[in-house]
Amino acid sequence: MNLLKGKTAIVTGASRGIGRAISVALAQHGVNLALSSRSMESLKGILEETTALGVDALPCPADIADPDSPAEIVRKTVDRFGGIDILINNAGIAIPRHICETPTEEWDLHMAINARAPFLMCREAIPYLRKSEAATIINISSVVGNKGYVNQGAYTASKHALMGMTKVLAQEVHGDGIRVHVISPGGVATEMAQITRPDLDMSELITPEEIVDIVMFLLTHRGNAVIDEINVRRAGNQPWK
Ligand SMILES: NC(=O)c1ccc[n+]([C@@H]2O[C@H](COP(=O)([O-])OP(=O)(O)OC[C@H]3O[C@@H](n4cnc5c(N)ncnc54)[C@H](OP(=O)(O)O)[C@@H]3O)[C@@H](O)[C@H]2O)c1
């Protein structure tokens, strides 16, 4: 039985990379979608792809660095679908730079997009998630949510902040039946990795579809076992490092 059919999900960063792959998989499972990225133009492709799969897909173009955007995305979603079952906080940026050369605005931008926006998305969506029997939040963090990588200071700090928020939130909404998961991948073959890690061979990176498999596992296994965090490393990387 398809437990996800007819449910509603918000996916941020749906225009490309991991978010786009997640959106396609959700549409294949019959999930109606609120798709967010900065512009209508960038959402065009994923809108066509998901609606062609027979689901209702609502474009929510918004810059989530703006603190008013999350409430607007949630409002639009609820107006269209009447509720929210799944929230995927995936949108993110990573600008590689030494901490000593990082402009204050660039630091703040990482924090606004990678940490504050997921917090605001959760805060605004939770009143609706509380009413869903399938309520799930999945935050896409990174290996740098737990470690520190040179020239990724602002990115690393923002993902640590996301991890901290996720750990507290998971406990605070546990009694409401809302499951909160975090996925912490190493390099995934997307535009972001091309920019942040030009030294890596793209063919050796994790594929977005492999992250999708994990997302779909989390969403379709609502038994007595719950996975709080999934760390995912590249096969070429040393285990436990
Ligand atoms: N790729 C990796 O190696 C890797 C590894 C670990 C974790 N992650 C995490 O995975 C997530 C997705 O990364 P990705 O590799 O798929 O990145 P990507 O290909 O660069 O895509 C980023 C997505 O975020 C959206 N976005 C960026 N800034 C935004 C803003 N201000 N407002 C709204 N949307 C915004 C982009 O939309 P538009 O540009 O179209 O507006 C795009 O859809 C991120 O949280 C990233 O930190 C990635």
Image: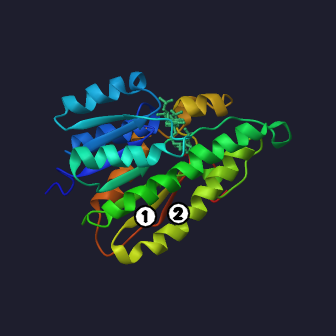
SS for tag 2?
A: helix
Q: CA distance from mark 2 to mark 1?
A: 7 Å
Question: Which kind of residue does numbered mark 1 sit on?
Answer: Val
Q: How many marks?
A: 2
Residue 135, percent across and down? 31, 62
Residue drawn 42% across the image and 56% down it: 124
Q: Is residue 239 left or right of residue 6?
A: right
Residue 219 appears left or right of 105: left
Q: Classify 10 Å Cα crowding around label 2: few (below 14), some (14-19), many (20 and above).
A: many
**111 in relation to 200, above or below:** below
Q: Is residue 189 above or below residue 215?
A: above
Would you name the residue on which mark 1 appears? 180
Scheme of image coloration: rainbow
CB of mark 2 within 8 Å of CB of mark 1? yes
Decide which of 78, 140 is in the foreground and name it: 78
The secondary element bearing badge 1 is classed as: strand
Quadrant of res 41: top left
Direction right: furthest residue: 100
The kind of residue on which mark 2 rests is Thr
Query: Along the line of sight, which residue is nearer the eye, 204 or 124?
Result: 124
Question: Residue 59 vs residue 205: left or right?
Answer: left
Where residue 72 appears, x then y in whole percent?
A: 40, 44
**Circle number at residue 91:** none
Which image quarter holds the N terminus? bottom left
Residue under label 2, please give it: 166
Which residue shows up at 35% across the image and 60% down it?
136
